Amino acid sequence: MKKNPLLIVLLLVLTALLPAQTADGNDDEGPLRGPVTGGDDINALHAAEEFRIGVQAYYRYAFNEAILSFERSLAFRPGEAVILDWLGKAYYRSGLEDTALRQWRAALDAYGRNSGPGMLLGTRIETVSNRRFLLPVANDEVRYVEAGRYPGRYEDYVLFHQPTAVLPADDGSAWVVAYGSNEIVRIDVNGVVKDRKRGPLNGFDRPYDLVRGTGGRLYLSEYRGSRVSVLNSDGDWQSYIGSRGLAPGMFIGPQNLTVDEDGYLYVVDYGNRRISKFDPDGAYILSFGFRSALFPGLLSPTGIAAGNGRIYAADAVAKQIYMFDPNGNYLGILINGGLRGPESLRFLSDGRLLVADTNRVLLIDTASAIVRELGLAGNERVRIVGADMDKNGSVLAANFAASEVSVLTRFDDLASGLFVQIQRVSVDRFPVVTVEINVEDRLRRPIVGLEGLNFLLTEGGRDVAEQNFLSPGYRSSAADISILMERSPNTANLRDDLAAAVRDINRALGEIPGSRIVSVISAGAQPQRERHENALETAARGASYSPRWRFDLGLRLAATDLLPAERKRSVVYVGSGAVGQLAFEQYGLSELAAYLANNNIVFNAVIAGGGQPSAELLYLCNETGGRAMALYRPEGIGELIKSVANTPNGSYSISYRSQLPTDFGRAWLPVEAEVYLMERSGRDSTGYFPPLE
């Protein structure tokens, strides 16, 4: 029988006017009716309907549509706290952070600062207002304090013994080199042992330091074995470098290791008081550190680090850090005084040295030679032999004396906790609900490595049923890319270069399973999507070039295409490096950076024609964790593209089975998420509308 559309509309209106039904089956005007309050007058009904449309658009990543709907809802219910709150969320995801903060402050006044929603919103406002940095850096004004420990013993079970080094991984875990128990152990952010390697049949013989080389391989020094083991990326033994002896290429008690920008391995040969250099495959090249007319010679060589085209070596007896070039030529003293007994050296991402020095961790600026005490390990028995910064910005310090790893965290981060955002709620399989949660610290750095035990989901304050931790973003090995092609007069004569860049990008993605080019955007006077399926080079060359090309509109379009894509994703700009006079006609630079960062999109730049990246391009790279790279370089741009798949990602998906009454799809169903990591925690709450019945 054919249905009458008018009858259906009348039934829906009447249903909307009926009182909601509670879990007890009783009629009630309770909070499940919807977050927009104020009765059943026509304005309230219009406001509620526009609010529903806005929430659904928000969860579809249609943030502009959501903003329009929330604005219309607000016109019917001026000053409504929950509408202002959601309007702020939509502006935030659109990159308009100043506007978002204005809406949130108005919502805070309407909620009341001491209410539950008000306190939660106040924390969000404070976090977004105070953010300044993105990547793991050690701020000179903030001290690191001990936030927790990974003990080497649990009751009567030895997890590891006498750690000497740590090597963080991209997934938030870290390898711990256990000198005393002859093994390397991989632990996650909760201190849970995830893997254990003991070497070939004869085992490791007092392993000391572990570094990452080219092609994912690992190098492990064995102090008593007087050799270096070569491991694959999973820690499985492959081969040896060197053996016991005095001759070149041999060792007596090798300790610390480093790998330079070209993949060459440097080994501190403690017993022979020298440093030996090897190529990536283990072939011996040279040794240095001997006494000369200018250099007193190494007495007790310990830590070593390669960076800035130099080799830095610590001496525990001389209490100094020396500098050499890659050929072993002595360049002078970096630090002469203020050290107690330096051991490991590690370069951070910002180019400064992290130094393990007895019971403390130091930070050294190699340009100015300024030394700052970053933090202290608090155990009574302390000898920090190795230290490094993990992907969450915490310093992991191997305490040999106490057989544990200390976790040092910025004091501000410990005090402010985690920044948790429920970014999306999917009800496609209702009553099974999937929640996407983004976890960051207060500096917008993603928190990676979390597991199901770090999350607690509730519905209206009660634990959810069947909470299931799904595959997190940091475990994803696939990457999606949107290519932004500059269509300016500068690139009109670089069409072959543009085609070569896209060809190289596609080739690199082909080596990463599940990865793809989502779109190719021509940033002309009117940016548009190119048809690129099976015709990438044609799409790259383009047809129209204009001095009025629009970088901002092109970037917004490229980024928007990535919103529903893989969680590891990047806009890759290909062009001359200059952004043009109309680059920020509609969207400002900071707004573009926020749009990318707030949606976990990395910006990378490939520069063609021998140009240099502009300051604006470098800013976008720095704010989102990307890089700028010349198209024609000996190594190619494949490394840049593959790095997208290794980008830290703090996105997590959790499903559960809702037990709340739906009122035939009209009810507003709340959900809250709490996240815990050692002494830090964070919380967010939101809601959604179930499917209409």
Image (cartoon, rainbow, N blue to C red):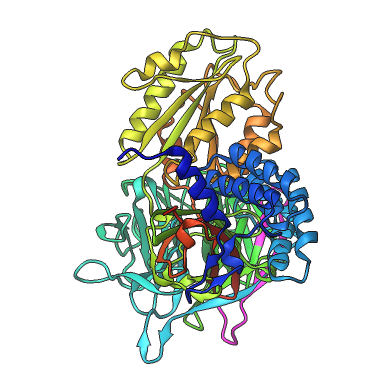
In this view of the protein, can residue 298 be seen by the observer?
no
Which picture quadrant has residue 252? bottom left
Quarter of the image containing the C terminus? bottom left
Residue 409 visible in the picture: yes
Find out whether residue 373 is within the magenta segment.
yes
Q: Is residue 607 above or below residue 294?
A: above
| As drawn, 606 above or below 449 | above
Q: Position of residue 516 (x, y in %)?
A: 36, 34
For the point 58% across and 31% down, the residue is: 556
Numbered-mark total: 0
Give the residues in magenta.
363-383
At a point 36% along the width and 62% down the height, the residue shown is 220
In the shown orientation, is residue 338 left or right of residue 644?
Answer: right
Q: Position of residue 278 (x, y in %)?
A: 38, 48
Q: Is residue 206 magenta?
A: no
Q: Considering only vertical position in the picture, is 554 above or below 322?
A: above
- The quarter of the rendered structure image containing the N terminus is top left
Q: Left or right of 138: which side holds 691?
A: left
Residue situated in front as seen by the camera: 464 or 231: 464
Residue positioned 55% across, 75% down in the render: 461
Q: Nearer the viewer, residue 191 or 336?
A: 191
Please state which of residues 465 and 562 is positioned toward the viewer in this rendering: 465
**Position in image of residue 571 (x %, y %):** 51, 33
In this rendering, position of residue 521 left or right of residue 67: left
Residue at the far bottom: name it.
Answer: 156
